[in-house]
Amino acid sequence: NAGVTQTPKFQVLKTGQSMTLQCAQDMNHNSMYWYRQDPGMGLRLIYYSASEGTTDKGEVPNGYNVSRLNKREFSLRLESAAPSQTSVYFCASKQVYEQYFGPGTRLTVT
Amino acid sequence: GQQVMQIPQYQHVQEGEDFTTYCNSSTTLSNIQWYKQRPGGHPVFLIQLVKSGEVKKQKRLTFQFGEAKKNSSLHITATQTTDVGTYFCAGPLNDYKLSFGAGTTVTVRA
């Protein structure tokens, strides 16, 4: 099992560009999450999907959209990137209570 | 809303010494989880505490949940270089969402 995979690992965007971060899990988990991590601020929830077909906003959803493509895949889209979105993005999945995190995407917006 | 606060933000430890990191919630928690993130890595689940006053041990790590279920602590004995990283506590906001603390970043002097 690969667990939770994320692509790309690194990305540099210019202000105003768009991109989609991909996430997939092979553990048959129902719930999936997108977090951002900034220095000194821990992990902040952007969006989550409790189960296939549902998505809900987290703590910091502005500037992002998500798609739960199927049970395995949960993507995060930045429509018009801003420097404030420079961060490390983690995808996670959960079945019971433990969350399993992917390796992260390091995004820089210039 | 619920906030989970962690202290200290940074902990510099001499190898072989003990230290404790603390987690405090503004509200009563049904459970609390702890995660560890190695430098450059992703968060990895360590443990979940559920009962009031619960104490669990994992080798040199001792986790405790307060009697009022509003605080928790992680105590590490005889710190080793493998303990380097950031330790996060997290409390549930609902059945699906967690509120993460900002983390305690541990460095070890050999």
Image: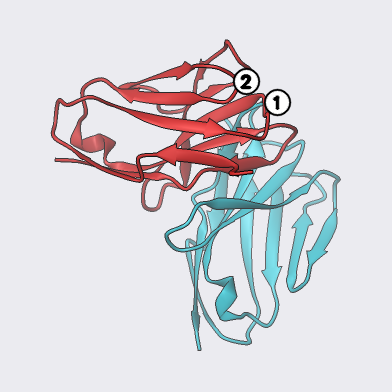
Chain colours: A red, B cyan
Instruction: Say which mark, if any, is on residue A50.
Output: 2
Could you tell whether A23 is left or right of A4 in the image? left
Locate the C terminus of chain A by quadrant: top left
Image spot of residue A109 (x, y percent): 19, 39
Q: Number of numbered discs present?
A: 2
Q: Picture coordinates of residue B28 (x, y %)? A: 72, 37
Percent x, y of residue A37: 41, 44
Tell me which amino acid carries mark 1: Asp
The reply, left or right, for residue A23 in relation to residue A106 is right
Q: Quadrant of residue B61?
A: bottom right
Q: Nearer the viewer, residue A39 or A88?
A: A88
Mark 1 vs 2: CB contact within 8 A: yes
Q: Nearer the viewer, mark 1 or mark 2?
A: 2
**Residue drawn 71% across and 44% down?**
B32
Position in image of residue B44 (x %, y %): 60, 52
- Residue at label 1? B95
Q: Residue at x 55, y 37 (%)?
A: A92
**On-image quarter of the N terminus of chain A:** top right
Badges 1 and 2, same chain: no
Taking the spot 60% from the left edge, 42% from the top edge, the residue there is A3
Q: Residues within 10 Å of mark 1 (few under 14, many from 20)?
A: few
